[in-house]
Image (tube, rainbow, N blue to C red):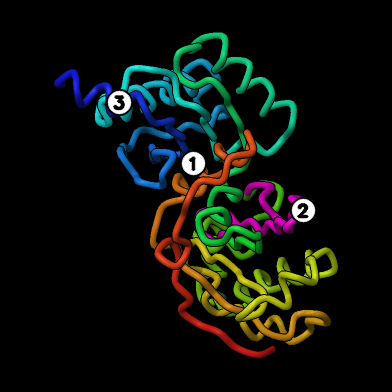
Amino acid sequence: MHLFEMTEADSFEYFGGLEGGATHSKFVLIRQDGNVVARCEGQGTNQWLIGQDECLKRVNGMVEESKKIAGIDKPLKSLCLSMSGADQEEAQKELIDGMKSRYPTASTNVFVTSDTAGAIATATETGGIVLIAGTGSNCQLINPDNSEYRCGGWGHLLGDEGSGAKEENDKLCQQMFTDAGHILAKHVLAVEPKVDQSLLDSPGGLHVVCVGSVWKSFLNGLKDARRIKKISFLTLEECGAVGASSLSARSIKFKLPMDYSKNASIFFQTDI
């Protein structure tokens, strides 16, 4: 690396975002001007499956790999870990404390949130609903004031109705994906009373970020909606790590430039 290039890199601040899953993870490094300067992938980072020590080791490995790709040799300005298994406040605090104490040069600031938060922040700046229906099912609403409400996400042992795991584990239900779609719709209806009116009044109505494939048959299940009059279904064109990078900036009151029209696309829009 030439001295000029290193000096130029050091004149910027950098924001990192992790999309941490149970089986694999993605990391994105974004410069303060909104340019993505590095991407990398790694193993799963769910601390409940691999332990906190190994989780943080894998996270730091991706941080350092991204720094090397970007040609920087200083702590990130802020780092967001949007991870499965990081929904509870106590667990989030432990991960933050662990990251700061074991890997102090990784980032000046560390912010931890659920995997659903990164998906929403990738698609929209103001909030919305993310509906996950893959191996597990989860529905999370994030309002413009950052208030959060959730339905599902308890795991297949307690109840992941509408998820792929539920269908695969019960052979009698393999032909009931339509019913699974209706159940996913009930997830949305469960958080409907808490949806901020501004989200309902936005262009295209309520935005629902769809992750997974089981949810595709759930539209008919929304016929009982009381407040939702129009709805837009979005799929991500970028990974949740991009939204996590944005959240890392927001956590220290910095607005990272982002073109949300490129991060997600509306594939279906309808009146209810």
Q: Which residue is mark 1?
A: 245
Please report contact status of discs 2 and 3: CB closer than 8 Å, yes or no: no
Q: Is residue 143 above or below residue 214?
A: above
Q: Position of residue 163 (x, y in %)?
A: 57, 61
Element type where label 2 sits in the image: loop
On the image, numbered disc 3 is attached to which residue? 65
What SS does tag 1 mark? helix
Image-quadrant location for residue 250: top right
Is 3 one of the magenta-colored residues?
Answer: no
Tell me: 189 left or right of 75. right
Q: State how many labels appear.
A: 3
Amino acid at circle 3? Glu
* Spatial separation of the CA atoms under disc 1 and disc 3: 16 Å
Discs 1/3, front: 1
Left or right of residue 114, residue 79 in this image: left
- The picture quadrant where one finds residue 91 is top right
Q: Is residue 152 magenta?
A: yes
Quadrant in the picture for the N terminus: top left
Q: Is residue 87 left or right of residue 23?
A: right
User: Which percent across, then down, holds residue 81?
Assistant: 54, 34
Query: Which segment is the magenta one?
Result: 132-155
| Residue placed under numbered mark 2 in the picture | 145
Q: Residue most toward the bottom? A: 271
**Foreground pick, 217 / 41:** 41
User: Which badge, 1 or 3, comes first in the chain's sequence?
Assistant: 3
Instruction: Give the CA separation, mark 2 to mark 3.
Output: 34 Å
The part of the image, by quadrant, that contains residue 3 is: top left
Could you tell me residue 104's position as x and y percent? 50, 11
Mark earlier in primary sequence (2, 3): 3
Verify CB contact (< 8 Å) between mark 1 and mark 3: no
